[in-house]
Image: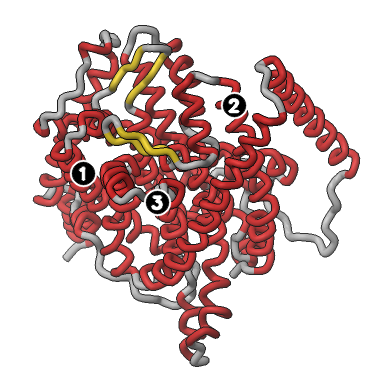
Amino acid sequence: MSETTLGARATNTASIKRLPNGFDLAALLFISAVLIAVAHAAKHTFAPLSVPQEVAISLDPTYLPGYALRTVMRMFAALACSLLFTFTYATFAAKSRRASMVLVPILDLLQSLPIYGFLTFTVTFFLGLFPGQVLGAELAVVFVIFTSQAWNMAFSMYQSLKTVPADLDEASTSFRLSGWQRFWRLEVPFATPGLVWNMMMSMSGGWFMLVASEAVTVGNTTFELPGIGSYIAKALMARDIRAVFYAIVAMLVVILLYDQLLFRPLVAWSGKFRFETTQMEQGDDPWMLALLRRTRLLRYIGDALGAVFFLVSGLRLGSVGRMRERTVRAPSRAADILWFSVLALVVLWAAFRIVTFFMNAHLGFGDVGTAVLLGVFTMIRVVVLMALATLVWVPAGVWIGLRPKRARAMGAAAQFLAAFPANLFYPIFVVVIVRYSLNPNIWLTPLIVLGTQWYIAFNVIAGAAAFPGDLQEAAKNFRVGGLLWWRRVILPGIFPYFVTGAITASGGSWNASLVAEVATWGNTTLHAEGLGAYIQEATVRGDTPRVLLGMVVMAGFVLTFNRVVWRPMYAYSSKRLRY
């Protein structure tokens, strides 16, 4: 047979393999249906902003599919913004020593300050950008959801960049990778397993704060955007248990859908970026990933996009890595002095402005002392609940994360539990506390940890899932077990991930205190003494000076706690506990 004939047959075979098959048809039908639904929901975004009374939220469950679609669109838009923020902000903080002195404390503050504090300013800003249009209100809601998603993703990326294994670091230097190449070829792949789990946590965090975000308030006017969050808020106000149940079912269905269609394939795909030299248990591919791999046309399109990404990530942008010299050049002392001087001036100016504002508002030392005392009460709650969450989720997270099949199976359940808004527990807590005359200072406390415990859980699971398989094999070969295995093998391996989860859980707990220390069911409202209730009550009264005082005191507690406890642990993990 001639070479020409063989070449023609090979070309025909390759062409046939690119033709769509039945799996392509199923995938294309599904993608088309999703795009049509998104386009139908998106057209409302460019409509004029109606009078609030005309946009009434119906508790009829037949409206829930449409509400769910619009809510999920907002959450994924916020997730895309969070990814962009993560790849820029966290990278800059990890690469620049001087910038990290400012960016990391700012990140601490942003992830702990109450989301309610952003609402007044951001809503006015976005509505001013698009006056009289729904788009302005939609962007305001997306921004609020962004503030509940971005911080833990940024911390995860920052932790990964700080703990890149030394041998991989040296390999990238030996291959003379540029800064751009190193970022896309080494650092992003190494950060991917932890980042995927934190993306799942971010989606759940968005659900947790959804009730506060879909009711946009400007002055005395409230615009309720159609969504599950506004549906839940109306059901709680109407004390409609059946509507609350419908909302829970809708949340469960939506979480199961995007877990099966997106996150479960992402978790399986991210497993190939584990840092290991021995092949460990991977588990079967999720059905969605298996379906995509059996398509022809979509795989061809994916390969083409992958080739384009490979070319772009291979551009030699930035400085080229060089072999490290034996002596490391010391930072410029003059530049450090100038930098610290500028920071000191900025801090002093900010302190002067805050003190002046408080003095003009006639707030005295007694008001400051009250806020600090209430902050101590909230801090005690946060510390106790963090300790309990650590005792529960470190062993549970290790047990889940070391087995990929187990991690994938429990992913959807963990996302649903993490997404459960604290507001939905108000009926239970209020009724039980009133019925049995319990102390709200104690029995409202668990509401704080309902959402924030999952930051620890998801990060520990991510750490265990990324734990190198060769180290597991070595521990088995040397018969290391029991407490010695926990102390010498797994705890050092997951410690950087745990610290990341603990920092975000701690900050999130302070944020959640606004929701947890004041519980309302119909006309009954319970208060627990704490800084969250202080800020919440001042917000309801429109007492802006005391709202700002509460936020400043909360910021002081968070920064002090992070500087004294979490930052030393972070530094220790990045220097002593790298693979």
**Picture residue at 37% right of the left edge, 31% below the top:** 212
Please, what is the three-letter code of the amino acid marked with disc 3?
Trp
**Count of marks, rendered view:** 3
Coordinates of residue 320 in the picture (x, y in percent): 68, 49
Q: Which secondary structure lies at badge 2?
A: helix
**First in residue order: circle 1 vs circle 3:** 1
Compared to residue 413, the image places residue 223 above or below, namely above
Q: Looking at the image, is mark 1 or mark 2 nearer the viewer?
A: 2
Q: CA distance from mark 1 to mark 3?
A: 23 Å
Q: Which residue is mark 1?
A: 248
Question: Which quarter of the figure has residue 301?
Answer: top left
Residue 231 left/right relative to 279:
left
**First in residue order: circle 3 vs circle 2:** 3
Residue 31 appears in view: no
Please, what is the three-letter code of the amino acid marked with disc 1?
Ile
Q: Which residue is mark 3?
A: 443
Q: Which residue is mark 2?
A: 548
Q: Looking at the image, is mark 1 or mark 3 nearer the viewer?
A: 3
Compared to residue 122, the image places residue 282 above or below, namely below
